[in-house]
Amino acid sequence: MTSNPERSTNPIAKMDQVEDFTKQRYRKGKSESEFRQYDAKASPGVAEFYRNNHERQTLDYVLAKEQEYFGLTRGKKTVWEAGEYLNTLVDDSDPDTDLTQIEHLLQTSEAIRRDGHPRWMVLVGFIHDLGKCLGLYGEPQWGVVGDTFPVGCAWSDQVVFPEYFASNPDAKISEYQTKYGIYEPNCGLENLNMSFGHDGYIAEVMKPYLRTEALYMLRFHSFYAWHRHNAYKYFENEKDKAMLEWVRKFNPYDLYSKGHTKPDMEKLKPYYDDLFAEFLPAKLDW
Ligand code: FE
Ligand code: FE
């Protein structure tokens, strides 16, 4: 991974770095003990990212951001327009590829399609990262990407870089530091306030239109502590238990489907036009 300081203001460079780090963490065939062998020295940029993320994602911050964005008052866009908008985040962190954001999304969705999964899941593949447009609205990278976790209750040590939570102001609020915090046992993951980022935002945009399985894939795709490490089980309700397998089914496509081959946009466009029209209105509220 190149880290050219001149590019440090590029809003997507760090996002891709964080994603590459996640891919490495969950490299196929890696043992659980190997998994734990990451540290701040090995990936200073990513460690700095998570230090900011863990220190600043407080319950108050999350509630304020949900208030700001979940009303979906940022205008109407088609799915293609949302993709084009995301394309303006130019990714020059990887000199080996000149793939646009839309092309990256198509790699994920095409891999799902090739494996014969239902059409709604192909759609999820294409849209799951469209919420990264939060970076274009001016949100800091630590408020857009990275692993997500519940706020307002004790942090699990299964969240990546858990040591950075010590400096989060919520650490001093005893009500938020009990196992259940402000929540009830088995209250359901959808009733937790998750750290703010692109996952929760895209799930809000798509909430009126997609089935529960799809919304879980969108909302919880970065909640690795839950779907990979079985943390926070005590908040699960029956619905969460049923949905976990779907979130897990989606995860490999998020982690491993991106390559360097350019998808043929011209050829694929009609299929995706039909797919979007099948599930979504022409214009969505963002
Ligand atoms: Fe994502
Ligand atoms: Fe993704």
Image: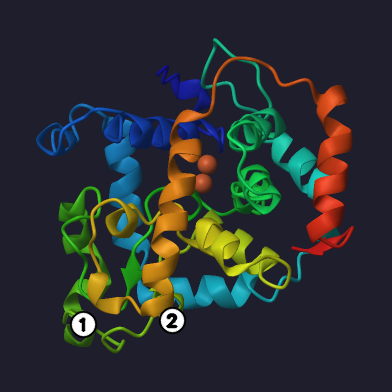
Amino acid type shown at disc 2: Asn
75 or 223, which is in the foreground? Answer: 223
Taking the spot 72% from the left edge, 73% from the top edge, the residue there is 208
> Based on the displayed image, in which of its 4 quarters is residue 251 positioned?
top left
Q: In this view, does 214 lie above or below 92?
A: below
Taking the spot 21% from the left edge, 29% from the top edge, the residue there is 30
| SS at mark 2 in the image | helix
Amino acid type shown at disc 1: Ile
Picture disc at residue 191: 2
214 or 284, which is in the foreground? Answer: 214
Q: Where is residue 276 in the image (x, y as percent from the top left)?
A: 81, 51
**Counting other residues with Cα less than 10 Å from the Cα at mark 1, is it few (<14), some (14-19), or many (20 or more)?**
few
> Based on the displayed image, in which of its 4 quarters is residue 170 positioned?
bottom left
**Is 3 situated left or right of 176 in this image?**
right
Q: Position of residue 87 (x, y in %)?
A: 72, 34
Taking the spot 41% from the left edge, 48% from the top edge, the residue there is 146
Picture disc at residue 69: none
Residue under circle 1?
173
Q: Position of residue 279 (x, y in %)?
A: 79, 59
Q: Which residue lies furthest to the top in this view?
A: 96
